[in-house]
Amino acid sequence: MSTKAFIKNSILIAVLFTAGYSLHGQNPKTARSVFKDGNYFKAIEIYTKLLEKEPNNPEYNFNMGMSYLNTNIDPKRALDYLLKTEMEGKFDDELLLHIARAHTHHLDYENALIYLHKYRLVAGNRAMKNPVYHKLKADCITAQDLLKYPVNVQFQNLGSNINSPFPDYNPFITGDGSKIIFTTRRKQRPGAKPEFDGYYPSDIMTSVKKPDGWFFSDRLSDKINSVFDEQSVGLSKNGDTLYFYIDHVDDVGDIFMSTLKNKIYSTPKRLGPEINTSAMESACSISQDGNKMLFSSMRPGGLGGFDLYMIRKTGRNTWSEPENLGPEINTPLNEDYPTLSADGNTLFFCSNGHPGMGGYDLFFSTWDEESKIWTKPQNMGYPINSPGDEKNISFMDNATTAVMAALRPDSYGDLDIYQVDYALIDDNAPSLFLFNLALPEGETLPELRVKNNYAELIGSYFPNRLTGLYVLALYPGKYYLYIDAPGYVPYNEVLVVNQFHKRQDNNVRFIKLTENPK
């Protein structure tokens, strides 16, 4: 971390405490209590003092490390404290998983895998039944490939008129790039006090683009914001309709909409029963033509956690029954924050179930109009994704510029909102795909056959002898991928190549074969 960023983070911690918290004594009982409550900022403040007196105390080091690991102050600092805990002797097996995760924040996935192996040896059968172990291992293997083939993008911090030392996140931009909506947890009301986690209640902000940059952001009116929590979760491409999630004492887990009238967002209206249920719904978006809406929900009947669903307009004010996007998109964990490209044919979303860099990663999928399916998701790559949580990305109509929240060296102290610009690629050039097929050591990697939409064989591919990756150069269109490996169920996949694949220097894909039970 740079000196500048470290100073900003130190200021953030100080601000959080002078804004409404006192230390109530720097004693182990208080430290343990605030750590258990999830106020990691306060825990860091107290444990810093306690560790000055007892630098080798394993409990202090563990809770300090976990506090850094669970905040955006500087997750990299967690590693030293967790390693110190390991050195001091007795510890719970789960510590090895936390150390592995801490290594990922240094992009050191090799050592992360070493600690996962240690955990496997110590925990035995418990490791094989632990989904955290399996997910973290899959992330480490996936991330090693993603790091080899970074996406060619440039990040630009949107500056102090948008960002603050507090978390600024969930940005959505209009198609023409003239307006942005986002969520903040900075202090917005006189007398406001931090919540249990040390942050202020979330509010929704807006700003407009001027020739010389973004105008100083404003808090939306009290029709939208309250003394409780509101978060932006979607925005129509023209900016006329805002979708947001509320977390109030007596009302939580539904999505509301508000429309722009005379430059002011109207009194919110709860979305209908096609979307909102007694379960939690957390985000939604609507296609530019207004005929498709995608949303995330924890309703019964899903594949686990938050799933993505789609409804279609059937009349002026009527919608179809929700359709789960299925196991190609949804996993036993969480998929959230669906947004659509301008043409409605590319779906962007986040997931902590598909393998990635760690935490939540951003993915995209293409709509196949013929078969009416969303194709196999593709990780949006590094450095778009990181070992932390990337939850939403919002593209302008030009399809090469987006906004997203990220934690980077020039952040103001926590998550900041950035403009992301993809390198321009020759429209006449094909998109390059790298397919990784992981098989047990010693097994021969099979042939990958590709056919076009007319069932004509485009080519037969074998992996590169050095990298083990299949390299395909494909022009926009629809393709069918086939793999027939002895001992495995035949694999096939529909791949629709569109303009978004042009924005990737390399489209890194991962194929997993299923063993044939016979």
Image: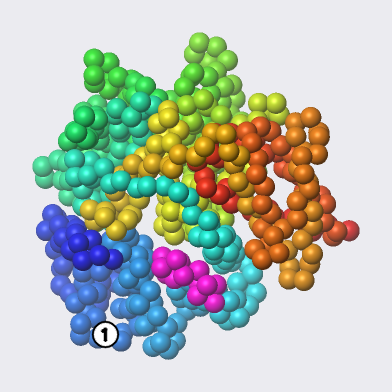
Q: Is residue 113 magenta?
A: yes
Q: Quadrant of residue 221?
A: top left
Q: Quadrant of the C terminus?
A: bottom right
Q: Quadrant of the N terminus?
A: bottom left
Where does residue 376 sit, x and y in percent of width and height? 64, 42
Where does residue 515 sit, x and y in percent of width and height? 79, 58
Where does residue 463 sit, x and y in percent of width and height? 72, 58
Q: Which residues are magenta?
A: 101-114
Q: Nearer the viewer, residue 82 or 374?
A: 374
Relative height, residue 13 to residue 337 (above, below): below
Q: Is residue 469 at all visible to an observer of this figure?
A: yes
Q: Nearer the viewer, residue 511 or 515?
A: 511
Relative height, residue 151 to residue 86 (above, below): above
Judging by the rendered image, the residue that carries numbered circle 1 is 55
Marks counted in the figure total 1
Which element type, helix, strand or loop, lies under badge 1?
Answer: loop
Q: Is residue 506 left or right of residue 262?
A: right
What amino acid type is highlighted by mark number 1?
Pro
Q: Residue at x 34, y 21 (%)?
A: 240
Q: Is residue 338 left or right of residue 436?
A: left
